[in-house]
Structure formats: C-alpha cells, structure tokens
Image (spheres, rainbow, N blue to C red):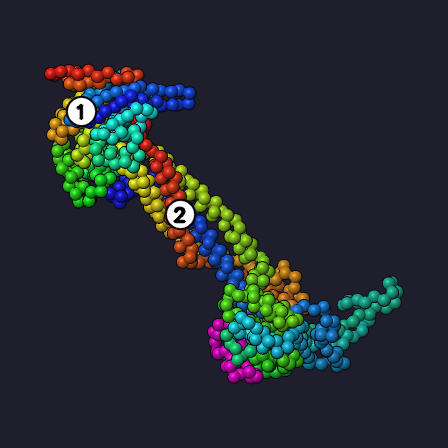
Amino acid sequence: MFFTYLRRELRRRRKAALVVASGLALGIALVIVVNSVSNGMGRAQEKVLQSLYGLGTDMTVTKAATPASGDAQRPRFRFEAKDDDSEDKQSSDRVMAQGFTTLPASTVTEVAGQKGVSSAVGGLSLNVVKVSGQFTRGQFQQGDGGVEMRGKPGAGPRYRIEGGGADFDVNMYTVYGTDVTQPALGPLTSSEITSGRTFKTTETNAKVAVADAAYAKEKKLRTGSTVTIKGATYEVIGIATASSGDAAANLYIPLKQAQKLSGEKDKVTTVYVKATDSQQIGAVKSAIRKNVPGTTVTTSADLAKTVSGSLSTAADLAAGVGKWLSIAVLVAAFLVAGLLTSSAVSRRVREFGTLKALGWKSGRVTRQVVGEAVVNGLVGGVLGIALGLAGAYVVTAVSPTLQAQLGGSGGGPGGPGGGGAFLAGPGRQAAKSLEVALTAPVSATTIALAVGLAVAGGLIAGAFGGWRASRLRPADALRRVE
Amino acid sequence: MYELRGVTKRYTRGKDVVHALDGVDLTIGDGDRLVIQGPTGGGKSTLLQMLGGLDRPTSGEVVLDGTDLAELPEARLTRVRSENIGFVFQSFNLIPTLTAQENVETALVPLGIKAADRRERAAEALKSVGLGERLGHLPSELSGGQQQRVAIARALVKQPKVLLADEPTGNLDESMRDEIMDVLERMWKEHGLTFVMVTHDSALAKKAPRLATIRKGRITVTEKTGA
Ligand SMILES: Nc1ncnc2c1ncn2[C@@H]1O[C@H](COP(=O)(O)OP(=O)(O)OP(=O)(O)O)[C@@H](O)[C@H]1O
Ligand SMILES: [Mg+2]
C-alpha cells in the first residue's frame, strides 16, 4: 500500500510535488555549478602553476634570499666604438643565472635524501640577453639642422653631432638547463613534444636543444635548425608546446651545457621536488628547511597564494560569494520545501485523520508523508543535477578567459633569489601573467554531493511534514475544514 | 456492548470552556441500533468520537466489551479502531488519489493482510454495496451516493463489531438518502453490527426503535417498545 499510495499521490498531485521539487532543484543546480566552477578555478590555477614547474612537482627549493650581492654580478656589455665607419655588426651575449643566485648541485642530492622526498631534480634557469648592432662614432659638424648642441646660450658657433650613436637590437630570451637523466620532473613536463623528440637520457652534455613552440615560431626554428647561444651552436631536436599556452622557457638544453654557458659549474637555480605522499608536503617542507640550510622551499600552495588577477578574483568569488549564495539558496530551498510539505499536510488533515481513525498507526502515516517528501527531493535532485549539468556545460562552452598574475602581490618576485626566482619561474624576472580558459568540470563527488543534498532536502521536508502529520488526531477525520 | 458512565468532554479555548458532553451514561447492547439526534453543537459528534476511540473523555468511562477506551494506551486504542470499529463520515472522507478499491483496502492495511487478499476482500465489499463495476474509479469519478457506498464498504470490509455513522446522508440529496439508508440497514442486519448513527433527519429518527437526544452535552434516551 505504501508504494501504491505514494505513486498515486505523486502522480495525481504532480503540481504540488513539482513545486517542492523545483525549489530543491534550483538549490542543487546552484551547488553543482558553483562546485564545478570552483573545480574549474582549481584546475585553472593548477594549470598556471604547472606551467611554471611542470607536472608532479610538489615544491621547489631555491636559494634563500640574501642581501643584494652588489654590482659584481650585474651584466656588462662591452662594445667598442670603432673609428672607421664600418658596417660590421657586433654582438654580445650575456648569459646569467635567473635571479643571479644559484645553489650547489650537491643540494639536489641533499634534498633527495630527505624523508618523504620521492625524487628531486635540479635545473638551471638562464636569461640570455643578446645585444647586436652597429656603432659609429659621431662627427661634429658646424651648421644648422639636425640635433643641435648649444654651447653658451646665444653665443658661439653651432655644432652638431651627426650619425653618432648606435643602432642595435636587444634580444632577450630564456634558456632552461634541464637534467636529461630525470625526464619525469621539472618544467619541461608541462610541455608536450609536438615535433621531433625530447632529450635522450644519455644526452647529458650534448649540443642539442628543445625549443618552445611559440619561440620557435617567432624565430622560425624547426627540428633540425640550429641556434647559437653565446657562440655555441645547438641543434634543435624537438619543439615543445606548453599545455597551458605559456612555456617555462624559450629554449631547453642539457643542464651541463647550461652550466657551461653561464659559467655556473655544478650549480642549479632551482630544485624540483616530488614528495612520496602529497598529504605530507608540509612535513617534507619543514624537513628540507631544517636540514638543508640556506634554502627557500616553496610549495604549490604557497605559490597559489600569490596568484592574482581575474582568476584569483573569480576563485575568491566562487569560494566566497558562490559558496555562501549556494548555501543560502539551499537553506531557503530546504525551508520552502519543508513549509510546502507541511502546508500540504495541513490541507490533508482530514485525509490523514481518517487513516488514523481507520486504525493506521501514526508512524505509518508519518512514513507516508516522509516517503512522498523524499521522492520529491529525489525528483528535485534529478532536475537539479540536469539543470546543474546544463549550467556547468554552458560555463565550459563559453569558457570565459581569466587572467592570472603570479607573484604580482608577493614580496619576492623579481628580487634576487629566494621565492622570487621560483615565482617568476625560469625565464621571467617579473611577475608572470597568463590567460587560462575557465571550465566547469562536474566531478563524481559533486554529483554524489547533489544526490546527498537531494535526499537531505527530502528528509528535511519530510521532517516538517511528518512532524505535522504525527500530531494529527484521529478525531481530525471529522473536521469540517476544506 | 458499550457501557458509558459519566462521560464528560470539555474543550477549552483560552478562557472559554465548552461542555461538549456533560455526564453521559449510556448502554448499547451488541447488535443494537441507536439513532442519535439533537440540535447542532449539542455534542453528537463528540459522543461518536468517544464511542469510536477517536478521542478520550475528560472524565468518565467508555467501556467496550470490558475494556475502558478512556484508559487505553494510544497503540492499543489504534488497534481497537482498526479491528472493531467501522466509521462512516458525513463527507465520505475518501482518499481522493486512491481508487475505490484502494480506498477500501486502506482499512485492511493496519491488520497486516497480504496485498492479494486485501484486493480480493475489497472487491467483494464493493460488490456487496453494488459497486462491483467501479473498483478502479477515483472518488471524483463517482456520485456522492456512490462515494458514500465506497465509504460503507471501507467501514465494513474488516468485519468490525461496531459501525458508527456521523450523518451519513447529510451530504446527499433525497434520492440517494434512502438508497444509503437501505444499504446501512441491510449491512446492520447481515453483519449483526452494533450500529450507532447520528442524524438530523427527523423522519429517520421517528422510525428508530431507540433514540438518543443530546442537548448541551446531556443525553436522553427514548425507547419505543414494540415499534
Ligand atoms: N475540537 C474542538 N475544540 C473546541 N470545541 C469543540 C471541538 N469539537 C467540538 N467542540 C465544541 O463542542 C460542542 C459539541 O460539538 P459536536 O461537534 O459534538 O456537536 P454536534 O452535535 O455534532 O453538532 P453538529 O450537528 O453541528 O455536527 C460544540 O459547541 C463545539 O463547538
Ligand atoms: Mg456533528
């Protein structure tokens, strides 16, 4: 009888059931969308972080920030202004370690030896500044026009310098020296080889390079081309396309070559660390900090805190407003469902009173009411999940673009060493900015949550109605209301 | 066998106290038929509620076959209702979403009878009130007289000892009144019921062999010997 009665009620009072169900559906749909968008934000942030140091990296170790190390390490360019008016081009490459700070390569093994560290790999990020051009000595000439150099105002002849100065390009790019023996960790893992091949593990000191796709396009490089860095020629063996659209470096070369180019023998700028257990990152971080002095350990969580721009604004919105909005709507939906169920019971006072007069136990009547409410909740859940999936699909289809600035608000970026070098990642001194498309992936957990909420909503509505029904007296069968 | 002694029912609404029943003493033998009449608000429905175990008196005893319903715990009172008492209401009180047959079945649900048996007995009960062809009809698809006949079938399908009817013809037009009264009379005789009926119909009341009149909660019983 329970199911017959339930079915009949739901079928014949479809409208009332739908009103309760749609209220719940709205709340549940909102939860799904907010949850999925939050997931999407998380993924977008992850993508941003990955573009910096590749997949699987749990934290990075860099040299601890030290007071500015003076001018000694500042790059110097030396050009000679030639006497003759030669058209010869001169060029000069400056190869510097990112942030001018390095760690000894032994740090890598030291870090790898820490408890909870699954693997550690060192890398050397280099900035290359190439200046090339012509320089001619200026000539003094008397006369009008041109650039005027005034002597004492109003007196004396006029002179001008003609043709003096320089005509040169400054070309900056980034090179990352990668440990080819450990291809599973490091920045290159966030790129996909779209042409040619990646490094062989034996090419520890080979004169080969992998070029980032965007840089390769700009410089018209392809597999088989050569690039020259500070006089050394490298064969491009592969083109790597960054999965997030923004690469960690323009060129990748074997670590040893990078060390040679920059004169940083047995040095690295960053150690990429993978923990054995992603839940234990905090413990690993403090172990490294304690046992490997003079280093800064940055976890992805630390880094995520420095993400700013519309991505983080949106993420904050999803986490804040979105969360509270969906909680508020959900609570409202539960309440409305409860009140509607309760008022539906009030309209059926005589019906339930009659059943009690017929000898139905109070519990049986209550169960009937709760059963109806739970089914309403489930119908609401199904509608809500459909609506939520549609909403999430729309967000993914539209996929609004969000900007992410990394380290922009942090203390260190751009500064020498420390977190700055990490935050900026190989190849960037300043805060890094990139664009990611927002998606709203609906996870199984989200669906499970929605189903749970639907059942909870039904039970809450049922509790309201059931409580009301349980208080009805059999004598209510004789009520004249209705 | 009903024995009511000093049954009083007071309703309190704020400061107002209504004596719906005021010291009612009444005996109804097994298989008896009692008609109750009286002015509106006199306490007729209240008395019927006491007899049916739908409510408890403020004081006094309502003894049915040796058990005082006034003292019975709720669960046992519910059982007495489900097993021994059939109710027919003025406004039929059918479940609007259930078919005629399902409505009759609801009376058998608390008795723990299997679904197949329930259906069969419900169909039979409906046949006996002349609705064998209307098992699958909803109340809204039946006339008032037919609805009341479904309600009578529902009251009697469990074969109770007592049939209580509160103005069973009150919502029906004249042609249907006689029809329903005929059905009730036949059922009373066939099932050997103790039958208590409240009515406003003075013609009906006049015919009754035993007539109780309730005014302001007080009862007077007139017997018509040899009627
Ligand atoms: N639940 C209640 N709360 C308060 N007062 C009530 C309640 N039920 C009945 N009464 C009062 O008790 C008195 C008797 O009511 P009852 O329903 O028994 O009268 P009745 O004789 O059946 O009248 P009618 O012929 O109109 O059906 C009335 O004054 C009524 O207002
Ligand atoms: Mg009445």
Residue in the picture at 19% in, 38% down: B101
- The percent coordinates of residue A155 (x first, y second) are 88, 65
Does the segment drawn in magenta span residue A45?
no
- Residue projecting furthest to the front: B66
Magenta stretch: give its range: A187-212
Residue A349, placed above or below residue A105: above
Q: Quadrant of the C terminus of chain A?
A: top left
Residue in the picture at 63% in, 80% down: A266
Determine whether the residue tagged by mark 2 lies in a helix, strand or loop: helix
Give the number of the disc on residue B160.
none
Residue in the picture at 26% in, 26% down: B62
Residue in the picture at 28% in, 25% down: B61
- Residue type (three-letter) at the residue carrying disc 1: Gly
- The percent coordinates of residue A117 (x first, y second) are 54, 72
Asked whether A195 or B15 is in front, the reply is B15
Residue B100, placed above or below residue A314: above
Q: Is residue A177 left or right of residue B165?
A: right
Given the image, what chain letter belongs to the residue carrying mark 2? Answer: A
Q: Alpha-carbon distance for marks 2 and 1?
A: 53 Å
The residue that label 2 is drawn on is A456
Give the number of the disc on residue B29.
1
